[in-house]
Every structure is written in C-alpha cells, then in structure tokens.
Amino acid sequence: MLRYAGLLALTLWVGGLVVLAGIAAPSIFDVVEGQAAGNGRLLAGAIFSEVLRRFHLLSYVCGVVLVGTLLARRVLGPRPVRFAVRLGIACLMCAAMLSSGMIVSVRIARAQSSIGAAPSSLPPNDPRRVAFGRLHALSTGLLAVPVFGGLVLLFRELKD
C-alpha cells in the first residue's frame, strides 16, 4: 500500500508537470491570445500563473506523500533498493518545487505587476524584459528537476 501511494503521488506530480508544460500552457496562450486582442498575452499569463499556483499546492502534497512513503517503507520494510539515492532525489524534487512556488513565482508576479503589460511587449533589450526572461528560465529549469527526478524514481520503482 505504501508503494502504491508513493507511485500515485509521483505519477500525479510528474504527469501534471508534463501536461502543464506540453498542453495547458501552449493551449492557454494560443486560445486567449487569439480571443483577447491587445492584452491577450497578459491575460493568458495570469490564467497560467493561477493554474501553476494551484499545481504547486498539489505538488507539495505529492512531495510529502512521496518522502513519507519512502521513509515508512524503510522503517517497516522491505527497504527500497538504493534508499538514500531515492530519498535524495525526492528531497531535491521537493526543494525545486518549493523554490519555484514560494520564491520564483512570487518574483515573476512582482515583475509582471511592475511592467503593467505583457513582458513580450517590451523591447528585447529592456532590462525589465530581460529580468523577466531570466526568472521564466529559472522557473522552467526548477520545474524540470521534478520531471527528470520523477522519471528516474519511476524507472527504479518499475525495476524493483
């Protein structure tokens, strides 16, 4: 039962991130930009930011379940193969999501608020657009950590 709960949390977490990046974000931006003339990109960004904020909450729960089930399996047995590596990956995934949700997302929201328009509407060399681009790249990189870490953990679980 513990293994199932951990796998379920891991699958929701990794699958959710893949769906957000590969389907939800492009769809939201395509549809809203096509429907809302002028401020469509800004509105799409606001919608996706809220979706991502809610997903961060789910990912925190998934992280707690994943780490908790790994620890419980270690104590109750049988101990997961390469337990320390798995726990390290799970903790790294949690740290990346916490950083993304509690630090970078807040900075992105502040940057968008200070710009008052879609960052893409600014000239390419505008310092605010450059700063926003860096934050967006950092967010994307942080969200990639749980995807790749989760795929490694899923592979390990399937091998056991």
Image (cartoon, helix red, strand yellow):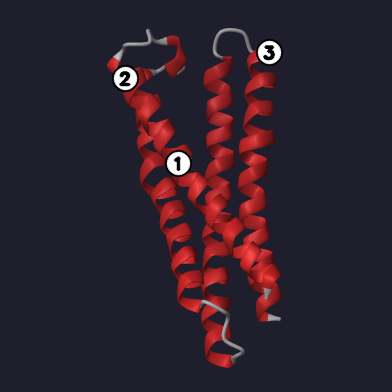
Q: Position of residue 90 (x, y in %)?
A: 49, 65
Q: Quadrant of residue 27?
A: top right
Query: Tag 2: Cα neighbours inside 10 Å, few (<14), some, or many (≥20)?
Result: some
Residue at the limit of the structure toward the left, as seen here = 127
Chain-order first, disc 3 or disc 1? 3
Q: Amino acid at mark 1?
A: Gly
Tell me which residue sits at (57%, 50%) in the image: 147
Nearer to us: label 3 or label 1: 1
Check disc 1 and report the residue beneath it: 141
Check disc 3 and report the residue beneath it: 34
Tell whether 67 sits left or right of 115: right
Cα distance, mark 1 to mark 2? Answer: 20 Å
In the image, 55 versus 21, the foreground residue is 21
Q: Position of residue 118 (x, y in %)?
A: 46, 17
Chain-order first, disc 1 or disc 2? 2
Chain-order first, disc 2 or disc 3? 3
Q: Position of residue 126 (x, y in %)?
A: 31, 12
Which mark identifies residue 101? none
Cα distance, mark 3 to mark 1? Answer: 28 Å
Query: In the rendered view, would you say 14 is above or below 133?
Result: below
Q: Amino acid at mark 3?
A: Gly
Query: In the rendered view, would you say 64 is above or below 19?
Result: below
Check disc 2 and report the residue beneath it: 128
Tell me which residue sits at (40%, 38%) in the image: 138
Find numbered disc 2 in the image and state the secondary structure of the residue it sits on: helix
Q: Amino acid at mark 2?
A: Arg
Tell me which residue sits at (43%, 60%) in the image: 92
Quarter of the N terminus within the rendering = bottom right
Q: Quadrant of residue 44?
A: top right
